[in-house]
Amino acid sequence: MMLRTCCHLCCNRTGPTCTFKIRKIMKTKIAFIAAFCCIAISITGLTETTPTLEIVRRDTTSVYIINYTGSKTGRVKITIRDEEQRTVLIKSYKDIKDFTLPLNFSSVSDGAYSIQIDNGTDKLTKTVNYTKSFAPSYSRVENLGNGLYLLTASHFGREKITINVYNELSTKIFSQEKEVRGDFSMLFNLQNVTGIPYFEISEKLGDFILIPGHPRAILVKENLAGK
């Protein structure tokens, strides 16, 4: 009985000794909570996704599928350069983490093209070694210089295609649906467009971004008969 009374009195008194013990217990609890928070933050950092970039060609067509998995949600910029380090395409996404993008190389010449994905923190770059393989049906766009772009398409029979044009900031500046019968061409004057424009085509083969190519030189034989 005496032991219980003494313990009871000691635990209920508010003297310097008990105050010191209470402070010590509180400091221990605070230190434990801080250590727990640090561990939680470390675990969160370890589980953050590492960006990945995968590029796959769609069968034997000129379309390549870009599969990107990011580490965070935000602005993502895609830049494509040719072998001479000339920028041929720039496309941006806002508030995005992962995406799949079909790119059509049918307008450009054979060669190596670097594809860079930049999310503001991480940059990933891969090279596509493109070899031309024109299909009987195709759509392509050529950069004629001075802001002029020539869109051409060739399809068997009758087919509807949707043409969308964007500026470098991915703002749509043109959209139109066309019915194509055989060969089709359309000239665009984009001198006042911000940055490098790009074309998006929707057709039976699917939706894809066309990478503008440079004009082709075509040799035409003259008919010298009668001269």
Image (spheres, rainbow, N blue to C red):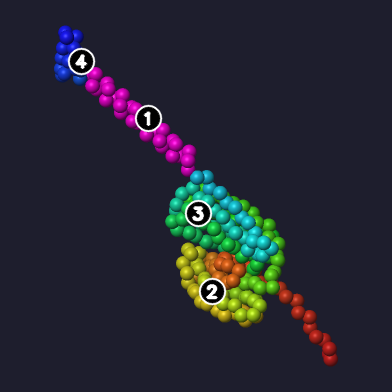
Q: Estimate the x, y position of residue 25 in percent, counting from the top left.
A: 27, 22
Q: Is residue 125 above or below residue 90?
A: above
Q: Are marks 4 and 3 in contact (CB under 8 Å)?
A: no
Mark 3 nearby-residue class (10 Å; few <14, some 14–19, many ≥20):
some
Q: Main secondary structure of the magenta part?
A: helix
Earlier sequence position, callout 2 versus callout 4: 4
The label on residue 162 is 2
Q: Residues within 10 Å of mark 1 (few under 14, many from 20)?
A: few
Residue 98: give its label: 3
**Quadrant holding the C terminus:** bottom right
Compare marks 1 and 3 and give the one earlier in the sequence. 1
What's the mark number on residue 35? Answer: 1
| Residue at the right extreme of this rendering | 226
Q: Amino acid at mark 2?
A: Thr
Q: Secondary structure at mark 2?
A: strand
Of the pair 25 and 141, the residue shown nearer to us: 25
| Residue that appears at 52% across and 77% down | 177
Left or right, 72 with respect to 29, comes to right
The amino acid type found where label 1 is placed reads: Ala
Q: CA distance from mark 2 to mark 1?
A: 58 Å
Q: Quick one: label 4 or label 3, which is nearer the N terminus? A: 4
Tell which circle, 2 or 3, labels the residue nearer the N-terminal end: 3
Label pair 1/3, CB-CB below 8 angstroms: no
User: Considering depth in this image, is 218 or 158 the residue closer to the camera?
Assistant: 158
Which residue is located at x 29 percent, y 25 percent?
A: 27
Percent position (x, y) of residue 98? 50, 54
Q: Is residue 6 visible?
A: no
Please provide the residue range marked out in magenta: 20-48
